[in-house]
Image (spheres, rainbow, N blue to C red):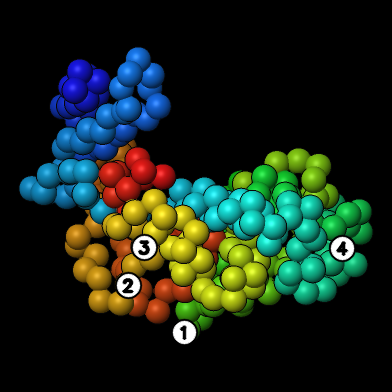
Amino acid sequence: MELENLLTGVLEEIVRDRKLPGVAAGVVNCGDGEEGAFASTGERAPGQKWGPDTMFQVHSVTKLVTQFAAMRLVEDGRLSLSDEVRVHLGEHWSSENLRVYRGKKIEGEPVYERVKREITVLHLMTHTSGLSYACPWGTPVDEMYQSSYAKAAAMSERETPQQLENRLSKLPLCGQPGEFFNYSASTDILGRILEGICKTTLDRVLDELVIAPLDMQNTFFAPNGMDSSSIARIYERSPVGDLEDITDFELAPDAKPIGGEGPVSTGADLMKF
């Protein structure tokens, strides 16, 4: 209880100083005979208090859950970290069919080099696969990814995980597999491997291997008809320092689960994880 009171006091000071509109935090395995503590304070939306069961989009925390599920399969002998991605997803992921971007010629034509080694499950889990993301990091490959994701978002029908995987396999790598870290869509590809091994959709894979065993009852990919108003709002700072609600999302009923983002959860559930 002493730790919980201390944590609550720190969080209340943060909210009082308007550093955050609302916040939840937990401490686990803290030693000294205490199992841990959880506290929350502030508002998840105007006039609505934040609590341990407040739901919010966990975004890239999903990657940790997907990777944990993968390690469960490794433990069971159904997957190996040294497995080549092409073995699970097909030859479009073989080194023979991939290429690494190396720059442009004077006349503007792109220059590529061959891929020296196969991408493995370990490369996906450590973001050393050579894949990139749709992030504005300024490299030519990042710009290619941004363009590719923008075209997919403009499609009338939502992209399936298989379509995402096939699309990414056609983009150049930003570096040789295993040679450097680059935060990327690697976990989305890992999710496709898990689907193939378990022969079901990723949401069911994660539920069977992680979510249900840990009794995370409020963690799931948003179901059909879920009211987005029940989810915590998203804020950013204005140029003058004020908090502004910039929430602009809909929990699409046709959203397909992928390994890198998507579920909603609560602070209490994430403490269990």
Query: Tag 1 or tag 4, which sits nearer the N-term?
Result: 4
Instruction: Say what secondary structure mark 1 lies in.
Output: loop
- Determine whether, in the image, residue 256 is placed left or right of residue 181: left
Q: Which callout, 2 or 4, points at the residue further toward the start of the chain?
A: 4
**What kind of element bears circle 2?**
loop
- Which is nearer the eye, 139 or 90? 90
Give me the residue at 34% from left, 57% from top: 219
Residue marked by disc 2: 223
* Mark 3 touches mark 4? (CB < 8 Å): no
Labels 3, 4: front one = 3
Q: Disc 1 vs disc 2: Cβ atoms closer than 8 Å?
A: no
Query: Quadrant location of the C terminus?
Result: top left
Per the image, the residue denoted by label 3 is 220
**Gap in Å between the C-alphas at discs 2 and 3?**
8 Å
Q: Disc 4 and disc 1: Cα gap in Å?
A: 32 Å
Q: Check residue 62 in the rendering and tell me which mark sits there, or answer none.
A: none
